[in-house]
Amino acid sequence: MLRPILAALFAASPVLAECPPAPDISAEMDALIAQIGEVENEMAARPLSNAMWEQWLRAPDRRAQELLDEGMSRRSSYDFLGAIAAFDALIEYCPNYAEGYNQRAFANFLRSDFAAALPDLDRAIALRPRHVAAIAGKGLTLISMGRVAEGQDAIREAVALNPWLSERRLLDMPAEPLRDGIDL
């Protein structure tokens, strides 16, 4: 079922030899990170966190946006394999767009396939070093793999950029490896 949908998306989009560069969101992210560091509570930080997501989800072109939206829609309806297929197509088309990797990692995380999620998170962070959600996601993934101290280090890095992340609560847990992961 997914292949016909993806084929239709590609057919409806102009054929491009390659994906254009991802939008430069550095100025917007600088401003959001500065603002979120100054707010007084989590409620005031929420709109700023949402604005960060709006920036990360700006795909390079219409074709990439359609693939991203398809993957996110499938993930929202618990069709994780369909979501991964859409994100695979997005990454193949736009290998330098961080959000494709971040979203595929999230789909794999939800499937408890942490070993598949981790390299995608590393790639997303390499492409967007201040991608707070990917950094926090890496922390959650490492903790879920029993690598608690490493995971907490990643979460500290994310919290330095956004002190209101809900993942900050995991900094208080013992840094010993967990036997059965964590219940997120």
Image (cartoon, rainbow, N blue to C red):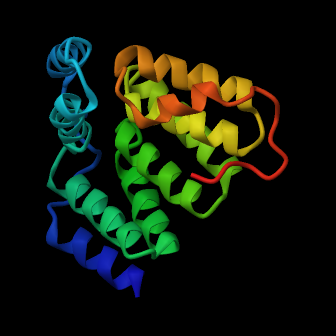
- Which residue is more in the foreground, 145 or 176? 176
Quadrant of the rendered structure where residue 119 is? top right
Q: Give above or below for 165 relative to 73.
A: above
Residue at 43% of width from left, 21% of height from top?
159
Q: Residue furthest bottom?
A: 1
Count the numbered circles shown: 0
Where is residue 120? Give x, y as percent: 55, 42
Question: Which residue lies at the image location 21% right of the left edge and 34% below the top edge?
Answer: 43
Looking at the image, is 93 positioned above or below residue 98?
A: below
Q: Position of residue 48 (x, y in %)?
A: 18, 30
Residue lying at 48% horizontally and 35% vertically, measured from the top left: 167
Residue at 41% x, 41% y is 95
Quadrant containing the N terminus in the rendered view: bottom left
- The quarter holding residue 177 reads top right
Residue 46 rendering spot, x and y as whole percentages: 22, 36
Q: Position of residue 47 (x, y in %)?
A: 15, 36
Compared across the picture, whether 142 is left or right of 146 comes to: left
Viewer-side residue, 107 vs 42: 42
Q: Is residue 32 left or right of residue 144?
A: left
Task: From this view, report whether residue 79 is shown above or below residue 63.
Answer: below
